[in-house]
């Protein structure tokens, strides 16, 4: 006779894990043709925030390949509230260590996630927009395949 106790416990744990994750409010990616991000190309994300009683986490999602020539990435991020006020931030993140080993997960295409805003308390309900531009010295940035934005409740 087979003892199903281990299987039942494993199934219970698998069902519990998603319940512990942060509820995602928004997640979207934009792809760059031929893995080339032109300096003039601004990527805009819009999300509707309905619950202002809880804090949020805003993450930048990035995918790059082995042809990305730098170990860091500078971004200019413009954040606009429903009331029209605008804030621009400059953000730098390291994508590789000093030896060129990528921090992201993957093989030849690496996914990397890093925080933009943590513990954000949105002041009003409505549509918020995030516009992202690359801030590197290269006019065309090779090796970046996708950029995304993910917002989840803390």
Image: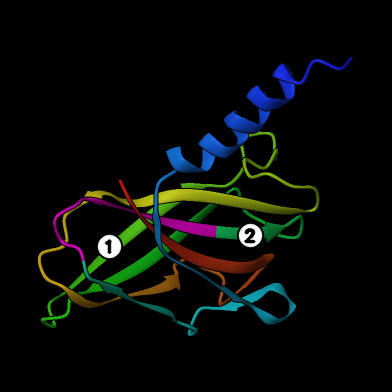
Marks 2/1 in contact by CB < 8 Å: the verdict is no
Q: Secondary structure at mark 1?
A: strand
Up/down of 144 relative to 11, above or below? below
Q: Residue at x 45, y 41 (%)?
A: 19
Q: Which residue is mark 2?
A: 63
2 or 1: tag closer to the N-terminus: 2
Quadrant where the N terminus lies? top right
Q: Return the x and y of residue 154 as percentages of the image width and height.
A: 30, 45
Q: Which residue is mark 1?
A: 89
**Nearer-the-camera pick, 21 or 77:** 21
Q: Residue at x 56, y 70 (%)?
A: 138
Q: Residues within 10 Å of mark 1 (few under 14, many from 20)?
A: few
Up/down of 116 relative to 154, above or below? below
Up/down of 132 relative to 152, above or below? below
Q: Secondary structure at mark 2?
A: strand
Q: Residues within 10 Å of mark 2 (few under 14, many from 20)?
A: many
Q: Return the x and y of residue 139 as percentages of the image width and height.
A: 56, 77
Residues shaded magenta: 51-61
Place residue 144 in its image quadrant: bottom right
Q: Return the x and y of residue 94 as percentages of the image width and height.
A: 52, 45
């Amino acid at each position: 006779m087979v003892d199903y106790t281990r299987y039942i416990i494993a199934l219970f744990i698998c069902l519990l894990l998603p319940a512990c994750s942060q509820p995602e409010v928004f997640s979207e990616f934009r792809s760059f043709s031929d893995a080339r991000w032109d300096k003039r190309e601004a990527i805009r994300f819009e999300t509707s925030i309905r619950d202002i009683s809880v804090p949020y986490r805003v993450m930048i999602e990035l995918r790059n390949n082995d042809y990305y020539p730098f170990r860091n990435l500078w971004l200019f991020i413009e954040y606009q509230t429903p009331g029209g006020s605008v804030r621009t931030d400059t953000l730098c993140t390291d994508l590789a260590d000093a030896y060129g080993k990528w921090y992201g997960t993957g093989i030849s295409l690496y996914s990397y996630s890093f925080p933009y805003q943590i513990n954000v308390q949105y002041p009003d309900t409505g549509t918020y927009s995030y516009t992202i531009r690359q801030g590197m010295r290269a006019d065309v940035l090779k090796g970046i395949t996708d950029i995304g934005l993910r917002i989840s409740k803390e």
